[in-house]
Image (cartoon, helix red, strand yellow):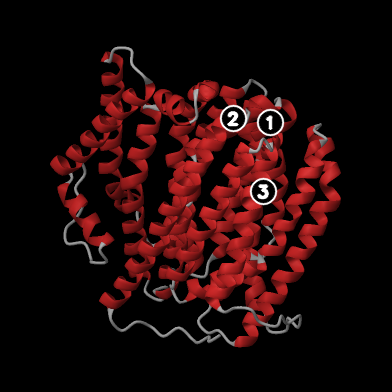
Amino acid sequence: METSANQPESDDESFGSRVRSAVIWRSGSQIVAQLVMWTSTFLVIRILAPADYGLFAMTQVVLVLLNLLNGYGFASAIIQRETLEPIHVRQLFGMLLLLNLGLGAAQFLAAPLAAAYFRQPEVTHLLRVQSLLYVTTPFIALPYALLSREMDYRGQARINLASAVIGALTALGCALSGLGVWTLVAAPMALFWSRAIGMTLAARSLVWPSFDFRGTASVFGFGGAMMLTQVFWFFQSQADIFIAGRSFSPHELGIYTTALLLTQILVGKFVPPLNEVAFSAYARIQSDRAAVAGAFVNAVRLILLIALPFYAGLWAVAGPLVLTVIGPKWAETVPVVHILALAMPLMTMQILFAPATNALGLPRIAVRNAAMGAVLMPIAFFVGVRFGLMDLAWAWLVAMTALLVATAANSLPVIGVGVEQLARAILPALLASAAMALLVTLVEAQLPPMAPPIKLAILATVGAATYGALLWLFARAMLLDAIRIARGKPPVAATPAL
């Protein structure tokens, strides 16, 4: 295994080409992998009961909390640092082993306490089996960091695709065998163990661990800050399940979490890989603040160009989409999806700030933003759950609006981007998406009764055609610039608002 100091790129076009290649491999493979996984997921949802997903969601609160301490922040530290020696790799491996073996033991011992809190005895057995997942983390996080440092996402892509297929086949096999909630345990187990083996082989990262942590203060500092950010993120993103899990029945919780699953497909599965590439790219140009600012605006423009019409369309076609994809027994999720689809664009925007501020060596900004989310979101959830399922969904929209405003106020001055500049980048896609959603809603009202799949196909076609036509007519320069940026070339024109 070879490690070396990062050399600054002398050719901007070469660097842009590397970023473009990284985005294609990371996001492209993620799209294919997620198509495989989501095809399997939707088939499994049609087989399992809402109560199965409610029980599984209870275990995820514990897993997500403990996984915040799994050391991925330390792995990110070696991506951000300018030089890397073999001893640093061995020390990181040692940190990851100690942390994750301890976390697995802690989850095994604490499982009965979680089951008692949720008043569901089966949670004990689910959590104890899931504790084996922690063994895989050192063998995923270390090679991920080494490959990402070199912006080599090709190896990662192949492994992710292979593990996605293994996980999907495991899920389908278990569901068809009648294993119920255990299907949701077995599938990620197969996925993560296969990914750990593949990633270690791809990066050739199997080294002898070092438990001598002298000289790792910078790693602990940067990684600790990112870990603290993730702890706050837990309170922001999992407080709803923690609070609702004690108040709602497994069926109600299953309805809520499935609606959340549908609306978070983009922000939870497709945006994070782009953020990984963005962090690596920002870190490479961190000494040029103007370049970071420009790259950030371009990243926001490109991601929201896709995300905003996705969420607007989800809001407009929630009914036929749910009935077509996961079946009539999940019809109760439709009104919840309507509300959450309005909150997720705000969440998508909010998580785009952290890669830029972290790459600039200022993880305290992300910590501060996450701390605010850890206060705002649980308060909103606590109030919402007292009034029922729909009000819990509305709590997402109210709290996420406030959090986005606060995050932007903290982050934009550090990145070097003004509010007006950012608004100009977002406004065309926002207005086109809103107009598209309104037209789709009007068209649906005029359609005669028909099968949900046919209605969905008609409305999706109308929506896609409307959005594309509006951008071409009123924001053509932005659309062409977005295409140039995606091809690794600089933009040639300012982006006009609609």
Q: Which residue is mark 3?
A: 186
Specify few, some or many for label 3: CA neighbours under 10 Å numbering under 14, 14-19, or 20 or more: some
N-term mark: 1 or 3:
3
Q: Mark 3, mark 2: which one is toward the viewer?
A: 3
The residue lying at 62 percent from left, 27 percent from top is: 384
Q: Is residue 451 above or below residue 260?
A: above
Q: Tell me the SS state at disc 3.
A: helix
Residue 244 circle label: 1
Q: Is residue 126 left or right of residue 467?
A: right
Check disc 1 and give the amino acid type. Ala
Q: Is residue 411 above or below residue 14?
A: above
Mark 3 or 2 closer to N-term?
Answer: 3
| Residue type pointed to by label 3 | Ala
Q: Is residue 350 visible?
A: no
Local crowd size for mark 1, using a 10 Å CA cut-off: few (<14), some (14–19), many (≥20): many
In the image shown, does 330 or 186 lie closer to the viewer?
A: 186
* Cα separation between marks 1 and 3: 25 Å
Image quadrant holding the C terminus, namely top left
Query: What is the x, y in percent for residue 454?
Result: 32, 24
Q: Is there a contact, CB below 8 Å, between mark 2 and mark 1? A: yes
Lower sequence index among marks 2 and 1:
1
Dividing the image into 4 quarters, which one contains the N terminus?
A: bottom right
Q: Is residue 153 left or right of residue 390?
A: left
Amino acid carrying label 2: it is Tyr
Crowding at label 2, few (<14), some or many (≥20) Cα neighbours within 10 Å? many
Kindly identify which numbered label has been placed on residue 474: none
* Residue at 41%, 28% in the rendered image: 321
Q: Secondary structure at mark 1?
A: helix
- Residue drawn at point x = 36 percent, y = 53 percent: 300
Q: CA distance from mark 3 to mark 2?
A: 22 Å
Identify the residue under disc 2. 256
